[in-house]
Amino acid sequence: MNSQLTTKKGQVAKAALQHSGKLCYHRDRREKTASPAAEKEWIRMKLIIEQELSRQEPEIIIRCGLMDERLKRLIEQIKLYSFSVPAKKDGVLRQMPLEEICYFESVDNRTFLYLEHEVLDCDLKLYELEEKLRGTTFVRISKNCILNAAVVAGVRAQLNGRLEAILKNREKLIVSKHYVRGFREKFED
């Protein structure tokens, strides 16, 4: 099967090919840039998805000229979906996807993983998590806490240079002044 669909302005072109158990989708997307000087320029991005029944795990390859901020944010989101953290509740071990985790907290040499409405035990130490989560939306906000910046709804300034991070579930966490700079970089992206 070989088909192609193009819009009148040629902004989207799709092709689907199916042969020998392999299904491919191709999307060619062009967007106008926000810069007035480059008004007539287009940003072009190809998205090619190949589905192979024999493949054991997904593989993502990104080919680009210069890596801009939008592409860096996209890569951070992809990393979130490619990693999970083992955690326990009531003796049952579960693999928790990063996108479901609000933050990690260390209390009395134990690490806890906080979801929107649930708390689980995690066997990893914060320094191990910090290393594994490098390049994702997670950021250290205090000596005992690593926060997912993607779940922050708002930020409020506090005394002594600290910040209060208000999460989407309305929980509030304090960002220590030592970690404010790194938090702002993640949050403002």
Image (tube, helix red, strand yellow):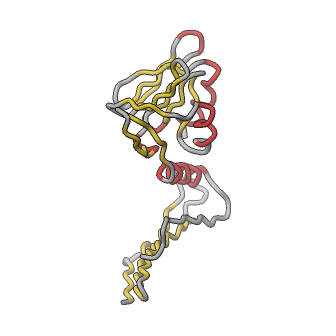
User: For residue 5, what is the image quadrant?
Assistant: bottom left
Question: Which image quadrant is residue 36 in?
Answer: bottom right
The tally of labels here is 0
Determine the image quadrant of residue 92: top left
Q: Is residue 189 above or below residue 32?
A: above
Q: Position of residue 162 (x, y in %)?
A: 56, 16
Residue at 53%, 17% in the rendered image: 108
In this rendering, is residue 74 above or below 158?
A: below
- Residue lying farthest to the right in this orientation: 66
Spot occupied by residue 30 in the image (x, y as percentages of width and height): 49, 67
Residue at 56% x, 44% y: name it: 136
Q: Quadrant of the N terminus?
A: bottom left
Residue 110: x %, y % from top left: 51, 24
Task: Please tell me which residue lies in front, 172 or 120.
Answer: 120
From the image, which quarter does the C terminus lie in? top right
Q: Residue furthest top?
A: 159
Q: Which residue is at the front of the view, 34 or 122?
A: 122
Residue at image position (40%, 32%) is: 120
Residue 114, position as x, y percentages in the image: 41, 31
Between 94 and 73, the one lying in front of the other is 94
- Specify whether residue 105 is in view: yes
Can you name the residue that lies furthest to the front here? Answer: 91
In screen coordinates, is 29 left or right of 186?
Answer: left
> In the image shown, does 109 or 53 lie closer to the viewer?
109
Residue at image x 43%, y 45%? Answer: 95
Q: Compared to 148, does 58 lie above or below?
A: below
Is residue 10 visible to the viewer in this orientation of the structure? no
